[in-house]
Amino acid sequence: MSRADRQAGLRAEIESCISDRAFALAYQPIVHLDTGTLAGVEALCRFHDGAPPERRFRQSERLGLAADLDLAIIERALDDVAALPPGDVSVNLSPSTILDERLCDLLVGADVGGERLVIEVTEHARIPDYQKAQDQLAVIRNSGIRLAVDDAGAGYSTFEHILSLRPDMIKMDRSITHDIDSDGARRALAAALVLFGADIGATIVAEGVETSDEIAALRRAGIHWAQGFALGPPAMLPLPPLAYEPGAPDDEATRRSARARVQTALASVRSAERELEATVATARETGLSWEEVADILGMTRQGASKRYRQ
């Protein structure tokens, strides 16, 4: 069989999968580590013919069918929302789907509260047109739907999506989570990601959690949301109840967690201060008087000019 015949056969196979909806969705819980409550779920596709999902998605992208497949999966997830427990519902997108105008029509027009939906794009897949992606995502996010960047820190990830798209959530790759309890470098990287997330207003979610020791290390690093087999495997509807119960951290862990929270809050405050200083400087350059600045800030003219004079 020639290469062209194989490609044609593969295309027909995937097109049939899409048209027949020959797949099911399993949902993996995303858990709040401190309370043991369900924060949301991630929709994961399982094909009826047993095809490995990652391989099927790569083939679909190569054949120009990724958007059609993604949109079919999203439609199925939207149909399931009413049967899912309260919380976020995350769906994964290929780069080509982000640029497809049908995505906006489907998500924004869905009869589902936008505040429940999260769309995920993997960090290690290239987006060919960032401006178009940003324009489309702006419309989607204005409807209340949030954006997550998946696989942050995986392999040779450059964090390009995070820097360009400024997501609401950053999903830390399992390569960092794995053995984080015994690896100081992984803990340092996770803590740095927490501070970075606070600086841009993004929630950090750890992926691939497999042990109770990893859970404890994540909590000490200031990461409060996670998913993985230690918290709950992917499951078909109806979802089983969560088995995870958070234990009380020891005194040292409590102090470390409190320290991480203070550092996170401090990073947010400093970021806001820098933004305010830059905004005041720009306002002054465009003619706003110190009296007007002081009135907006609720300060005296002398206090405002002293605090924000460059």
Image: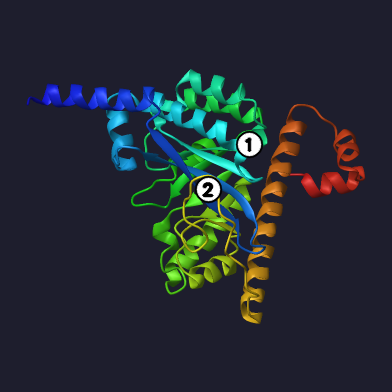
Say which residue label 1 marks: 82
Amino acid type at mark 2 = Ile
Measured Cα–Cα span from mark 2 to mark 1: 26 Å
From the top left corner, tell me how far across and down residue 295 is, in percent: 91, 37
Please tell me in which quadrant of the rendered image residue 299 appears. top right
Q: Which of 258 and 143 is in front in this view?
A: 143
* Left-right relation of 118 to 54: right
Mark found first going from the N terminus, 2 or 1: 1
Label 2, secondary structure: give it: strand
Judged by depth in the image, the label closer to the viewer, 2 or 1, is: 1
Number of numbered labels in the structure image: 2
Which residue shows up at 53% across the image and 70% down it? 217
Q: Which of 150 and 44 is in front in this view?
A: 44
From the top left corner, tell me how far across and down residue 144 is, in percent: 66, 32
- Quadrant in which the N terminus is drawn: top left
How crowded pointer 2 is (Cα within 10 Å; few <14, some 14-19, many 20+) is rated as many
Amino acid type at mark 1 = Ala
Q: Residue furthest front?
A: 238
Which residue shows up at 42% across the image and 57% down it? 174
Label 1, secondary structure: give it: helix
Say which residue label 2 marks: 170
Which residue shows up at 49% across the image and 46% down it? 236
Which residue shows up at 44% across the image and 27% down it? 72
Residue 167 appearing in the image: no
* Left-right relation of 63 to 75: left
From the top left corner, tell me how far across and down residue 25 is, in percent: 46, 40
* Left-right relation of 185 to 141: left
